[in-house]
Image: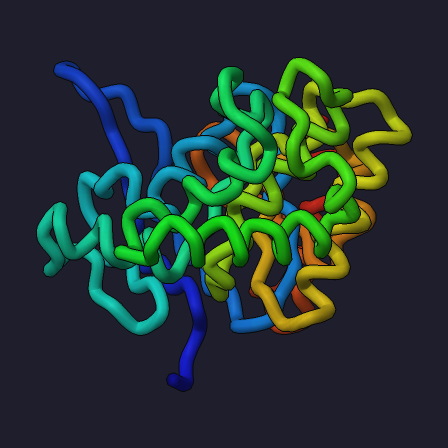
Amino acid sequence: MSGPLISMSAVTRSYGSPPTVALRHVDLEVERGEMLAIVGPSGSGKSTLLNLMGTLDRPSSGDIRIAGHDTGAMNDAELSALRAYTIGFVFQQYHLAEGVSALDNVATGLLYTGVPLRERRARATVALERVGLAARARHRPRELSGGERQRVAIARAVVGEPPLILADEPTGALDTRSGAGVVSILAELNAAGTTVVVITHDPQVAERMPRQVAIRDGELVGDSRPDAAPGFADRLVGAAS
């Protein structure tokens, strides 16, 4: 399918009454195979933007298309199916089940696809190999380091081979070395063809991405892509601070 993997047009998200605007008139396109960082300070609207990209939330106004699908025209069941087959999520706090092995944590990434348990585990084994954790498959989360737990979370996100990975502060709870390892794994996935969007407040993480988009006070204020609006790339500098 041609066209951007993510297309957002005049997207606004507000909450409450009187409304508090978390995101304002955002226009953003992410091409298939891109790897980019969305960078900004706390409260800038980064997580709201990710939730909208991931169809975990709906905009107050504007249009969002994911893999060619008009999400505004889809019901909750259709959005759930879109997420199951198209989007893998990675979060700062891992969200792993403590009572089960790394293997079965990864296998849950296929829970809503109808894949039988034996196949889910076989594919989870492959996903753990991709992130260098095949030898830790039987370990439970409490037996793993923070970096290893995040790699399990990445394996869970990619087990279904979705075209899109959305990572929300994936290095935020890690030391510098472990964080660098996580970014390297995301880069390897991108090199293999997966589109990767990383939400971060860390300029060092953002600098490792081929494209950086800056957000402040709910508005996009910088984009390093060469065809961005005139002056937009220049405003990226310092926008995250």
Q: Is residue 55 left or right of residue 177?
A: left
Q: Position of residue 111 (x, y in %)?
A: 33, 45
Q: Position of residue 109 (x, y in %)?
A: 43, 45
Q: Farthest residue in the front direction?
A: 118
Q: Foreground residue, 157 or 167?
A: 157
Q: Foreground residue, 76 or 239?
A: 76
Please tell me which residue is depicted at 90% across the width and 30% down the height of the picture.
177
Q: Farthest residue in the bottom direction?
A: 2
Residue 41, visible in the rendered structure = yes
Q: Position of residue 180 (x, y in %)?
A: 84, 38
Please tell me which residue is depicted at 33% across the width and 57% down the height of the picture.
115
Is the N terminus in the top left, top right, bottom left or bottom right quadrant?
bottom left
Q: Foreground residue, 145 or 101?
A: 101
Residue 53, visible in the rendered structure = no
Q: Is residue 86 above or below residue 37?
A: below
Q: Give the number of callouts.
A: 0
Q: Position of residue 240 (x, y in %)?
A: 68, 32
Q: Is residue 162 above or below residue 2?
A: above
Q: Farthest residue in the right direction?
A: 177
Q: Is residue 3 above or below residue 69?
A: below
Q: Is residue 234 above or below residue 31?
A: above
Is the C terminus in the top left, top right, bottom left or bottom right quadrant?
top right
Q: Is residue 109 left or right of residue 149?
A: left
Please tell me which residue is depicted at 60% across the width and 33% down the height of the picture.
102
Q: Is residue 137 left or right of residue 6?
A: right
Please tell me which residue is depicted at 50% across the width and 36% down the height of the picture.
104
Residue 174: name its quadrant.
top right
